[in-house]
Amino acid sequence: MQVLSFSSPKLSTRNIVYMAMLMAMQIVLGRFSFGTPWLKISPAFFATILMGYYFGPWLAAGAAALNDQLSIMVFNPGANFPGFTFSAAIAAMIYGMFFHGKKVTVMRTLLGVGLVLLISNVILTTLWLNMMGTPWQGIIWPRTIKNVVMLPIQTALSYGTLKAVERIRPHL
């Protein structure tokens, strides 16, 4: 039995429509973020997790990258940094590897969410902010503490969402 999934479903019209709905959901939820530019909290992770769950690592990563670029074009024209797009794609890929075609468990959810928070949010985003001129020494600890606090919250919310979706998945 494989621990991680490296497959994605075929692109059909139905899958493209579902992916577009999740991309729109991610953009809308992303508008409800709050905090400083280097310490944001947002419910947009729900859409990213669902993209990974339904579409696997590759399609979810592509959709997350495309979605990041679309939201930049619509809401922040001229403020594009490709590192954040890469972080969004990596997060969706990790979620897809942990959840696509796999049974949802608390441990799987904790590991998937934990890796995204560590790799994408703490390490990569701090690196991108450092490259943009914010000294990493001043933001690493607040970002780490925020993500440690968010780990159980995001894990519980993700687990509840995925368990609910797991029950209705055959009906889609």
Image (cartoon, rainbow, N blue to C red):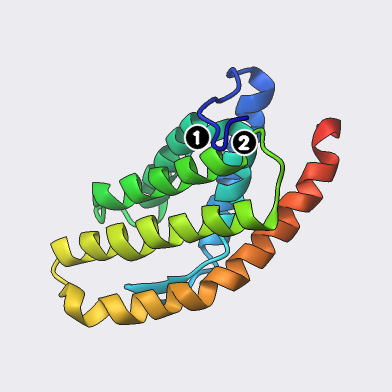
Which residue does the image show at 32% across and 45% down from the upper left?
86
Q: Which mark is residue 70?
A: none
Closest to the observer, 104 or 65: 104
In primary-sequence order, the first of circles 1 and 2 is 1
Quarter of the image where one finds residue 102: top right
- Judged from this view, the residue extending furthest toward the front is 1
Q: Quadrant of the C terminus?
A: top right
Seen in the picture, residue 171 relative to 138 is either above or below; the reply is above
Mark 2: give few (<14), some (14-19) or many (20+) Cα within 10 Å: many
Q: In the displayed structure, does residue 132 sit left or right of residue 104? A: left
Instruction: Kindly identify which residue carries mark 1.
Output: 57
Closest to the observer, 5 or 74: 5
Q: Quadrant of the N terminus?
A: top right
Quarter of the image where one finds residue 53: top right
Amino acid under label 1? Pro
Amino acid under label 2? His
Seen in the picture, residue 70 relative to 18 is either above or below; the reply is below
Seen in the picture, residue 89 relative to 5 is either above or below; the reply is below
Q: Where does the image place residue 109, in percent across and percent down from the top left? A: 62, 55
Is residue 56 shown to the viewer in this render?
yes
Element assignment for label 1:
helix
Instruction: Kindly identify which residue carries mark 2.
Output: 100
